[in-house]
Amino acid sequence: MAGARDVKRRIKSVDNTRQITRTMELVATSKLKRATDRVYAARPYAEALRDVVGSLYAPGMSEKYPILRQPAQVKRVAVLLLTANRGLAGAYNANLIKEARNLLEDLRRKGMETELHIAGKKGIAFFRFRGEEMMTQRVDIGDSPTVEDAESLVGPIRDRFEAGHVDAVYVVGSDFRSAVSAPPAARELLPIRPKENAASADTFILSPAGDHILERILPLYVRNAVFTALVENVAAEQGARRTAMKNATDNAGEMLELLTRSYNRARQAQITQEIAEIVGGSAALE
């Protein structure tokens, strides 16, 4: 009977785990809907900003706007890695970290110096374990990032680019396509590239003048690009967590079926043995 009791304890343990993973799946599904709505709301604004900046760009502006400088040679690159603070999301964090590692190795192989900035406990823990130097570490950005969060992340890096301390800036985050497809991607944030075949600034009627617009819109463009990356990361994380928890719930259900059959066989064997002992005892008495 000890075997049946052990199986019964395992059944209870697996059932409790299934309830937890099912609850986490439902929570992730709820958060995914809100996060997806934020992604779809942020993208049109980000694309419009990109088009405006690309269209208003003209050679020689870097003298007036350091953020527009186009380094003749890229010697030092800043990499901003965005990961989650929590796990239980399948390979979501591992894929982002792998993308950042590949980017760093590629840049260093080309002879460039790199500096690493990370937002998210999972990325920080990995590179700290590897002994990688991190210039900035952030763990205070949650599931509802704001434009202020984006500015606090990218502001110091943008200042370093304008001052000439770094020649390029990359952001490593998720390219959110759907709840089940959000591959990691490394995007070049700075320098700002002129839009190909863009209309000249003279084509537009600008009020105030174009340079005044650029003065305000350029920092906004960089900040908004990071904000969009943050909201895409949140949506990708929740999608990955929902998938991981659904798989865990399904696996727990299959395990429960196997354990229930094992328990029934153990009980049947015990009952059969008890009947045999009773029959044997009765025959001996006769």
Image (tube, grey):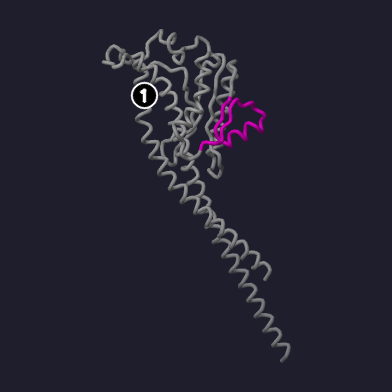
Left or right of residue 240: residue 136: right
Q: Nearer the viewer, residue 148 or 267?
A: 148
Identify the secondary structure beneath mark 1.
helix
Left or right of residue 50: residue 72: right
Q: Is residue 126 within the magenta segment?
A: yes
Q: Determine the image quadrant of residue 204.
A: top left
Q: Going 55% across and 39% down the picture, which residue do you hit?
A: 85
Left or right of residue 62: residue 202: left
Q: Is residue 180 within the magenta segment?
A: no
Left or right of residue 38: residue 104: right
Q: Which residue is mark 1?
A: 49
Q: Going 44% across and 23% down the picture, which residue do you hit?
A: 222
Residue 172 on image: x %, y %: 51, 29
Q: Determine the image quadrant of residue 140.
A: top right
104 vs 24: above or below: above
285 vs 119: above or below: below
Residue 4 on image: x %, y %: 64, 68
Quadrant showing the N terminus: bottom right
Quadrant showing the C terminus: bottom right
Q: Residue furthest bottom?
A: 286
Q: Which residues are magenta?
A: 116-141
The disc labelled 1 sits on which kind of residue? Leu
Residue 244 on image: x %, y %: 51, 46
